[in-house]
């Protein structure tokens, strides 16, 4: 079913052509026809495209099987991971598994009774952008760095969201952010190395530095940070990026969902999509007032950036690189 974009939020209007106009279905038909003509011309010219399927074969099981070398997985509704014959699956670094901090190895409790302090030493929820960083150039021993985009508070707490407390806010914040873990290929499977000198958790409470043109701006200053250069935490981290110099970029996406704001919001808040917090999402502002934009109007401005971390230096402070712009970043 196609989306009705006229009913969706447009918090940052522009006079430019919208993505919905550029991606009009009739335009895609024209592009597809042009692609087919191009492929035909390349074939007629004798170009060697032995690794490509024809447009007709790309959607067929016979074409895919011949090209990819494995049998397709049949359609099923079972709650399980299905893989072709000859392949195996392995769960690695599941939510709640200790990341490997020395002296802090709290076991995951299936009744969701782990405390916020224990969650700070465990894998967060909902892994997203993942990168492998080789140790000494190895393809079998390295660091795995990943985002934890959001929390399912119905699973995170023993009674879900039937009650709401300061402890639950702390645990939810601890399950956000980024994890760095050490992994190694041993005995024909990946092993999570615990403890590890590189193991690290960055959460919605971790100290982070602001750099770039927005650092120190009046809109970045708060009662807790008069300099506008130091932020507590990162959240809703989506996708990621890898720099040529070997650091990890984590992207703050739907930050507006975390901040309660006056109704209606002012022009600045409206432009960024701020609204009264939906009780079905995050209620952090009820016990952590910095997420109440009516009391701390500049706090939301400190989110929506790209965060850089050095996975090989666990004592380093992550940096929000404001030169990369502020948006609901999907990736970098």
Image (tube, rainbow, N blue to C red):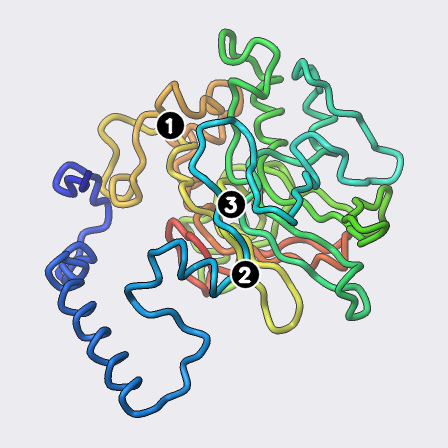
Crowd around label 1: few <14 · some 14–19 · many ≥20 (10 Å):
many
Query: Depth-wise, is mark 2 or mark 1 nearer the camera?
Result: 2
Q: Which residue is at 45% across, 32% downward?
A: 76
Crowd around label 2: few <14 · some 14–19 · many ≥20 (10 Å):
few
Q: Is residue 316 above or below residue 173?
A: below
Q: Nearer the viewer, residue 288 or 281?
A: 281
* Residue farthest to the bottom, as pictured: 45
Mark 2 and mark 1: span between their CA atoms? 52 Å
Numbered disc 2: secondary structure: loop
Report x, y in % for residue 75. 42, 37
Q: Which residue is at 35% across, 61% downward?
A: 58
How many numbered marks appear? 3
Mark 2 and mark 3: span between their CA atoms? 35 Å
Report x, y in % for residue 139. 75, 64
Circle nearer the N terminus (2, 3): 2
Q: Which residue is at 80% across, 27% downward?
A: 106
Circle nearer the N terminus (1, 3): 3
Numbered disc 1: secondary structure: loop
Q: Is residue 135 above or below residue 36?
A: above
Circle nearer the N terminus (2, 1): 2
Q: Which residue is mark 1?
A: 260
Q: Which residue is mark 2?
A: 69
Which dot marks residue 158?
none
Which dot marks residue 237?
3
Crowd around label 3: few <14 · some 14–19 · many ≥20 (10 Å):
many
Query: Depth-wise, is mark 2 or mark 3 nearer the camera?
Result: 2
Mark 1 and mark 3: span between their CA atoms? 19 Å
Kindly check if marks 2 and 1 are in contact, taking CB atoms under 8 A apart as contact.
Answer: no
């Amino acid at each position: 079913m196609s989306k009705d974009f006229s009913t969706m939020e447009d918090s940052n209007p522009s006079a430019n052509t919208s993505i919905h106009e550029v991606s009009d279905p009739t335009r895609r038909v024209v592009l597809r026809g042009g692609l087919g003509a191009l492929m035909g011309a390349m074939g007629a010219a004798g170009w060697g495209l032995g690794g490509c399927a024809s447009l007709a074969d790309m959607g067929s099981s016979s074409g895919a099987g011949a090209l990819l070398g494995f049998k397709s997985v049949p359609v099923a509704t079972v709650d399980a991971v299905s893989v072709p014959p000859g392949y195996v699956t392995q769960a690695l670094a599941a939510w709640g598994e200790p990341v490997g901090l020395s002296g802090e190895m709290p076991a995951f409790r299936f009744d969701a009774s782990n405390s916020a302090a224990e969650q700070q030493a465990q894998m967060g929820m909902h892994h997203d952008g993942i990168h492998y960083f080789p140790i000494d150039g190895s393809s079998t021993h390295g660091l795995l760095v990943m985002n934890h985009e959001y929390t399912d508070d119905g699973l995170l707490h023993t009674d879900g969201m039937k009650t709401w407390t300061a402890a639950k806010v702390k645990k939810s914040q601890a399950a956000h952010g980024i994890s760095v873990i050490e992994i190694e290929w041993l005995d024909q499977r990946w092993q999570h190395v615990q403890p590890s000198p590189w193991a690290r958790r960055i959460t919605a409470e971790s100290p982070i530095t602001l750099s770039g043109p927005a650092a120190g701006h009046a809109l970045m200053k708060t009662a807790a940070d008069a300099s506008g250069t130091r932020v507590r935490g990162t959240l809703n981290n989506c996708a990621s990026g890898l720099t040529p110099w070997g650091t990890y970029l984590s992207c703050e996406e739907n930050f507006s969902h975390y901040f309660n704001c006056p109704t209606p919001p002012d022009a600045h808040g409206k432009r960024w999509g701020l609204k009264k917090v939906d009780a079905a999402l995050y209620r952090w502002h009820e016990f952590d007032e910095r997420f109440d934009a009516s009391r701390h109007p500049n706090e939301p401005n400190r989110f929506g950036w790209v965060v850089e971390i050095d996975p090989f230096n666990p004592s380093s402070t992550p940096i929000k690189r404001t030169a990369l712009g502020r948006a609901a970043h999907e990736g970098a």
